[in-house]
Image: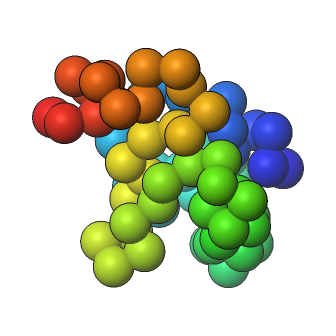
């Protein structure tokens, strides 16, 4: 499941929790646990306050990515 989420996040600028749930058909609680796991591993940045992904830390362009700033 984490690989599916990573793939989805890599192809989107910013994606909300609701959009992830809609596209994957996984339950919201399961998605949140997987996102928390990825964030704790340092693989993604997820804004848990606003419930949206703000980027993928594994991307070599993470610090200078224009898409991330939009």
Q: Is residue 11 above or below residue 43?
A: above
Q: Residue at x 19, y 36 (%)?
A: 69
Q: Residue at x 57, y 49 (%)?
A: 44
Image coordinates for residue 67, horizontal then vertical, percent: 26, 25
Q: Quadrant of residue 68?
A: top left
The colour style of the image is rainbow
Q: Quadrant of residue 52?
A: bottom left
Image coordinates for residue 4, horizontal then vertical, percent: 76, 38
Image coordinates for residue 27, horizontal then vertical, percent: 70, 70
Q: Tell whether 30 sits left or right of 56.
A: right
16 and 68: which is toward the camera: 68
Q: Tell whether 56 sits left or right of 3.
A: left
* Residue 10 makes an appearance in the image: yes
Q: Is residue 65 above or below residue 52?
A: above
* Residue 22 makes an appearance in the image: no
Q: Is residue 70 above or below residue 40?
A: above
Image coordinates for residue 14, horizontal then vertical, percent: 34, 41
Q: Residue at x 35, y 32 (%)?
A: 63
């Amino acid at each position: 499941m984490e690989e599916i989420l990573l793939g989805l996040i890599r192809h989107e600028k910013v994606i909300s929790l609701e959009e992830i749930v809609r596209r994957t058909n996984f339950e919201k609680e399961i998605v949140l646990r997987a996102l928390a796991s990825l964030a704790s591993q340092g693989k993604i940045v997820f804004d848990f306050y606003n419930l949206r992904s703000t980027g993928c830390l594994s991307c070599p362009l993470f610090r200078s990515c224009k898409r991330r700033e939009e």
